[in-house]
Amino acid sequence: MSLHRLRTLSTTRWSQLTSTVPKRHLTLPTSYKYDPSFVRLVDVSPRDGLQNERTPIPTPTKITLINKLTALNIPVIESTSFVSPKWVPQLSDAAAVMQGISKKEGTSYPVLTPNLKGLERALELGVEEVAVFPAVTEGFSKRNLNAGVEETLGRFGDVIAKALENGVRVRGYVSVVLGCPYEGDVSPSSVARVAERLFKMGCYEISLGDTIGTGTPNKMRELLKAVCQVVPVENLAVHCHDTYGQALGNIYEAINFGVRVVDSSVAGLGGCPYAKGATGNVATEDVLYLVHGMGLRTGVDLNEAVKVGNWISGELGRKNASRVANALTAKL
Ligand SMILES: [Zn+2]
């Protein structure tokens, strides 16, 4: 199916969906407008990237990272998570981080909110965007969210409703969309069901997460075909982990399919808890090289991004996980 045909189809679906569920989505920032020539990057390094670090990272380092990403002109920076400090001690300074960063007009700083309590903490700090993150499989959901898929959708539904009531927009992540560490293969139709639920509950965007990085481009295409039946491609993002070296191939497939929002992490920060020693999130620097090579814009300068990636790698005492960053650094 051609891209044009797909876009026409998704626009039709969009109007069908919006007419059945009015007033669900808040007005979005102008930078969120779908533009075929522009890829909106969502840098998740301050939260997804740092969450699995074993040694505590000083709050000022986290704040500096977010400020540097802001200066890079990254439009969306996933900043922290208002999760219980008992679950994720590394992010127990969520409030201090949000109060310490220098926000720029036009840049979004979403935070994760696992429950109403987390949302309330975020609301007190004037957060403008939050994210919820159900999984597709029972196994992953129970291990990571302590409840089955249906129960977590109910819980997140309350979070979404309350956020929207307070004028806060909500992004929905769906985890393990191309493979589950406990259940193996995941069917595209089961992902589509969860994505549709989140979209109907009011998430303005659904980020499809290949949490363990086992997906391949063909699987990504099959997944997008299924999900686009229920959520317009304009409202989709991809969140690819590079554990098996497939992230850029999967992102390339998604962009060719019409997706224009890509999650990434500077320096590829973020270990995968299910595959020791493997890399986690796809590196922002690698995505920039790919996207610019496709003739699309991001508003972000690759060389400057490399500097930020090298800086945070130095702070963490490791090598930058981005191949592009290492290649460019070697030339300097
Ligand atoms: Zn991730």
Image: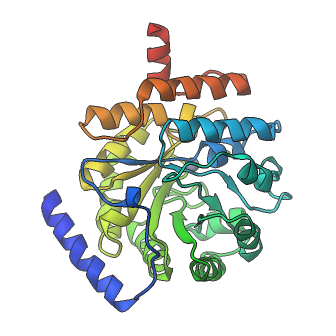
x and y percentages locating residue 303 in the rendered image: 45, 23
Question: As drawn, is 206 to the left or to the right of 268?
Answer: left
x and y percentages locating residue 239 in the rendered image: 48, 51
x and y percentages locating residue 85 in the rendered image: 84, 57
Give the total number of marks visible in the rendering: 0
Q: Nearer the viewer, residue 100 or 13?
A: 100
Q: Quadrant of residue 227?
A: bottom left
Outermost residue toward the top?
331
Outermost residue toward the front?
105
Q: Is residue 1 visible?
A: no
User: At 49% across and 73% down in the image, what residue appears?
Assistant: 203
Quadrant into which the N terminus falls = bottom left
Q: Quadrant of residue 35?
A: bottom left
Question: As drawn, is 323 to the left or to the right of 95?
Answer: left
182 lies above or below 326: below
Question: As drawn, is 58 to the left or to the right of 252?
Answer: right
User: At 76% across and 54% down in the image, what residue appears?
Assistant: 94
